[in-house]
Image (cartoon, grey):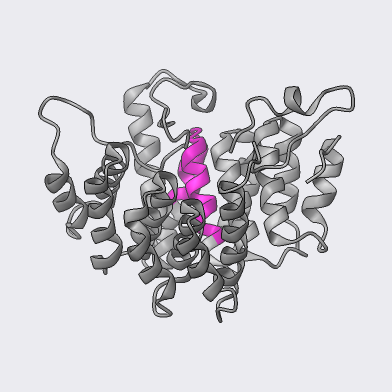
Amino acid sequence: MPPIHSLEAMRQRLLSPRTSVADRMRTIFGLKGVGTDGAVDILCEALLNDGETSVLVKHELAYVLGQMRNHRANATLKRVLGSRTENSMVRHECAEALGAIATDDVEAALQVYAGDLAEVPEVRETCQLALARVRWLRARDPKSSDRPTDTRGSGIDPVFLSVDPAPPLPVTPASPDVQALRAMLLDARAPLFSRYQAMFSLRNLNTDESALALCDGLLLDRSSALFRHEIAFIMGQTCRECTLLALATALNDPREHPMVRHEAAEAIGAIGTPAATRLLQQRRADAERVVRESCEVALDIAEHVTSDETHYADVLCPLNATPSSATEGLHL
């Protein structure tokens, strides 16, 4: 893809209905790499764009806004979270993003839906998790009034470079082993935040044994689509081939929630093997639009993984800069 020389060019590419879903995703992550207030404003504009009909794109916009942790996005995220006509995948991601940004003003919005039994489970549960994360951050750093710019105890994983919806369990000489973490992960009676902590602890171990424990969570859990979707997401972070069968099972199950199938597709793309590519090609005509589009994006990711491309995301390259200097630090 040719270099882009201005934020306005990135904005036009993102908002154009002629831009493919896969290319819009690259632009979204390109704006994340730019990281300025102007980039945040473009992402917010796209999230509020009535002409955007792709749930996948809107969901990814909200995700990236959360990862950027700029409170400038709060009003937009609250507005979309509060729209009950919006798709629940998008609303869920807005709630998670507010929990990632974690400024004091997000709590009231999250509390509205966290206790609403009439709310769809994936939105209600995300708000509960986001509130738990905000309170965890406050307990770690009660004097910090501007958590988005304070990285101490921020929950940004130093290896996977993501702002996670829950922290892993503390690592101590008495830390639970894989089997103990697996038991915590599968305990549907435990608080969801605690199960997420076990999940991210297993991710951080990043062995085949811990990955297979996560596979059990993906395939055996019947309590929460939100929980299963997060497992599929972190499988995409670890890219272990031993998870491919479990991910394929989730992707190919039409009874599974679309948000789980979507994350399974993109995780398969991140693994990027020939077998992964074949699985995605088989689902390009799936009845669910978000699954079809996820397979399109995942095939683009798989192509990137096996190519000599340095960057997945679009890169802002000033006219007076060489591509190498402009792309520094913008790896996805």
Residue 118 visible from this viewpoint: no
- Quarter of the image with the C terminus is top right
The residue positioned 48% from the left and 48% from the top of the image is 96
The residue positioned 27% from the left and 37% from the top of the image is 205
The residue positioned 52% from the left and 53% from the top of the image is 93
Across and down, in percent, residue 116 comes to 39, 62
Q: Is residue 250 left or right of residue 199?
A: right
What residue occupies the far right of the structure in this picture?
A: 319
Q: Main secondary structure of the magenta part?
A: helix
Residue 2 falls within the magenta-colored stretch: no
The residue positioned 89% from the left and 27% from the top of the image is 319
Q: Which residue range is magenta in the image?
A: 90-111
Residue 98 falls within the magenta-colored stretch: yes
Residue 57, quarter of picture: bottom right
Across and down, in percent, residue 23 comes to 72, 54
Residue 76 visible from this viewpoint: yes
Across and down, in percent, residue 285 comes to 59, 79
Across and down, in percent, residue 212 comes to 25, 54
Residue 8, quarter of picture: top right
Figure label count: 0
Nearer to us in this view, 14 or 3: 3
Q: Is residue 143 left or right of residue 172?
A: right
Nearer to us in this view, 143 or 264: 264
Q: Is residue 94 above or below residue 4?
A: below
